[in-house]
Amino acid sequence: MMQWIRLEERWRRRIKDADELADGYHFNYRIRYNFFFQVPITKKAYEKGSLTFVLNDELMINFGDQVVYNYFDQNRFFTGFNYFFSKNTSLQFGYLNVFQQLSSGNKYKIMNGARIFFFQNLDLRKKP
C-alpha cells in the first residue's frame, strides 16, 4: 500500500467559452491525494513471472482566490494487474475511469479507457 499528497501551483489560461481561449491567466493551487494498493496473486511476489492485482484512486481538488466554480477537479480510478518481467521491470494494465469537472463548474466529463504503463525501476546504489 502506498499513498501520497502532492501540492501543485498552477498558471492556467483563461477560458472565454467552450471553444475559445481568452487573454491572460488564472493562478490557483491543486492538491492531489493518491491511494495505491497492490497485492500479489502468484506465490512468488514481485519477481520474474509474478502477477499482482492493483487498485488505485487519485482525487484532485482546486483551491485559491481565483477558484470560483470548480473546487473539485477530477477523480481517477484504476483497477488492473501488474506483470513482472523481472524484479525491476513490469507492465501494468487495466481499466481507467476519469470523472472530471469542466471549467464551467456545472458540467462533468466521464472517460473510460484502458491504461498500460511500463515501469523500469533503476537501482543506482553502489554494489558492495
Image (cartoon, rainbow, N blue to C red):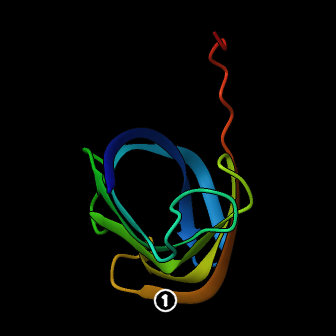
Q: Please name the residue shown 59% across and 82% down the image.
A: 94
Q: Please name the residue shown 65% across and 49% down the image.
A: 87
Q: Is residue 52 above or below residue 90?
A: below
Q: Secondary structure at mark 1?
A: strand
Q: Is residue 55 above or below residue 37?
A: below
Q: Is residue 107 visible?
A: yes
- Quadrant of the drawing holding the C terminus: top right
**Quarter location, residue 95:** bottom right
Q: Is residue 93 left or right of residue 33?
A: right
For label 1, the crowd category at 10 Å Cα-Cα, with few meaning under 14, some 14 to 19 and many 20 or more, is few
- Quadrant of the drawing holding the N terminus: bottom left
The one nearer the camera, 108 or 7, is: 7
**Which residue, given by chain and number where applicable, does mark 1 sit on?**
110
Q: Is residue 61 above or below residue 108?
A: above
Q: Please name the residue shown 56% across and 77% down the image.
A: 81
The one nearer the camera, 29 or 32, is: 32
